[in-house]
């Protein structure tokens, strides 16, 4: 019986996320203060005061990381729940590395701020796009992307669940692939509100620039396994971290494959820690036989504490 923590990716942010924890626990205030110092901004104000910077990638990423990490610290401290394994969706993989003791929180904050800035600037505004495709299998969608890419580049960027894939690429290519997917039986094709064609080869230059920031960081050994979006397996060792995090920016996120691997490695309970409950719903759609929960507020924390101690 293994429990895994999952950490939210970009898109999970909302005004007021983590505020009840911030008001209740001094440790959470201290974590926010640490992050604010690193970024030279008031991160609490960005998260709680309806600040438009919350949706700018360079601030979204450290904001989600900070809220997720802070909640996780309280989960470990107040109810004594420690995961047997961890993973995250894209940005969430950094929170997973911090959770495992491999990456210091103080190093992670400026790192994801830099990552967000590079991702945002990688492709000029309006030239890249992403879209969610519902109800079409990966094989059919791959074939559509390959055909469309003869004229305008598009590829699968996220394997979220069997029925939900995300495509990413040049705006024209994404729009053509959306039309084609609808013609071939997709239930829905929805353009995503993002600032670039993330997790495609168009972001390789951003990945290469980011590798310079990664080179300056020291990674420690893992307290428990961390799973990679790029390979869908757990990291073999700390030496693999820098190259996998560099590739992650321009590689598809194999979330579904990663969850299946974790289940095959013995995980029976998944707890999404941090803002939103998207990953919780993804896991439910991947395998109905595992237990899935999420903790984004104190009430949910108390509910899980009751279940554990009953």
Image (tube, helix red, strand yellow):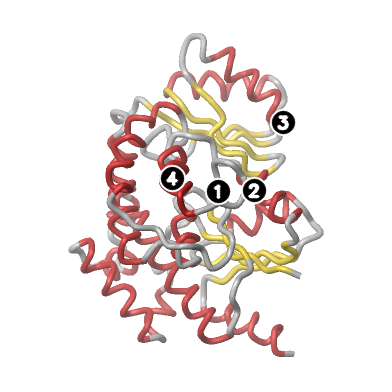
Label 3 vs 2, first from the N-terminus = 3
Label 1 vs 2, first from the N-terminus = 1
Can you tell which quarter of the image residue 3 is in? bottom right
How busy is the neighbourhood of tag 1: few (under 14 within 10 Å), some, or many (20 plus)? many
Which callout, 2 or 4, points to the residue nearer the camera? 4
Which quarter of the rendering shows the N terminus?
bottom right
Residue at image coords 40%, 58% = 219
Residue 265 in the figure: left or right of residue 95 = right
Disc 3 to disc 2, C-alpha distance: 17 Å
Q: Relative to 191, say whether 48 is above or below.
A: below
Res 245 label: 4
Label 3 vs 4, first from the N-terminus = 3
Disc 4 to disc 1, C-alpha distance: 9 Å
Residue 127 in the figure: left or right of residue 138 = left
Q: Which residue is mark 1?
A: 228
Residue at image coords 71%, 83% = 307
Disc 3 to disc 4, C-alpha distance: 27 Å
Q: Is label 3 in contact with label 1 (beta carbons under 8 Å)?
A: no
How busy is the neighbourhood of tag 2: few (under 14 within 10 Å), some, or many (20 plus)? many
Q: Which residue is mark 3?
A: 137
Q: Which residue is mark 2?
A: 258
Which residue is farthest top?
A: 150
Which quarter of the rendering shows the C terminus?
bottom right
What is the secondary structure assignment of the residue under circle 2?
A: helix
Disc 2 to disc 4, C-alpha distance: 15 Å
Disc 1 to disc 2, C-alpha distance: 7 Å
Asked whether 126 or 8 is in front, the reply is: 8
Q: Relative to 250, say whether 229 is above or below.
A: below
Q: Position of residue 51 (x, y in %)?
A: 28, 60
Q: Is label 1 in contact with label 2 (beta carbons under 8 Å)?
A: yes
What is the secondary structure assignment of the residue under circle 1?
A: loop
How busy is the neighbourhood of tag 3: few (under 14 within 10 Å), some, or many (20 plus)? some
């Amino acid at each position: 019986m293994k429990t895994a923590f999952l950490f939210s990716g970009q898109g999970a942010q909302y005004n007021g996320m983590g505020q009840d924890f911030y008001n209740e626990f001094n440790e959470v205030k201290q974590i926010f203060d640490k992050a604010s110092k690193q970024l030279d901004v008031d991160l609490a104000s960005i998260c709680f005061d309806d600040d438009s910077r919350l949706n700018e990638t360079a601030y979204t990423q450290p904001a989600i990381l900070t809220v997720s990490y802070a909640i996780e610290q309280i989960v470990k401290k107040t109810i004594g729940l420690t995961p047997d394994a961890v993973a995250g969706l894209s940005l969430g993989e950094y929170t997973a590395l911090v959770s495992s003791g491999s990456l210091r929180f103080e190093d992670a904050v400026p790192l994801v701020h830099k990552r967000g800035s590079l991702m945002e600037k990688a492709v000029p505004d309006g030239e890249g796009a992403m879209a969610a495709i519902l109800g079409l299998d990966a094989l059919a969608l791959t074939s559509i992307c390959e055909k469309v890419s003869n004229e305008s580049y598009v590829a699968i960027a996220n394997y979220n669940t069997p029925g939900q894939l995300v495509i990413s690429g040049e705006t024209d290519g994404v729009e053509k692939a959306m039309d084609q997917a609808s013609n071939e039986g997709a239930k829905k094709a929805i353009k995503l509100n993002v600032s670039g064609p993330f997790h495609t080869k168009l972001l390789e230059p951003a990945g290469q620039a980011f590798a310079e920031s990664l080179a300056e960081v020291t990674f420690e050994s893992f307290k428990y396994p961390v799973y990679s979006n790029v390979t869908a397996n757990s990291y073999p060792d700390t030496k693999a971290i820098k190259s996998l995090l560099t590739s992650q920016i321009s590689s598809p996120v194999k979330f579904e494959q990663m969850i299946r691997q974790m289940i095959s490695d013995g995980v029976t309970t998944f707890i999404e820690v941090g803002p939103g409950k998207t990953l919780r719903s993804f896991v439910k759609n991947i395998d109905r036989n595992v237990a899935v929960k999420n903790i984004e507020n104190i009430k949910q924390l108390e509910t899980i504490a009751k279940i554990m101690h009953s």
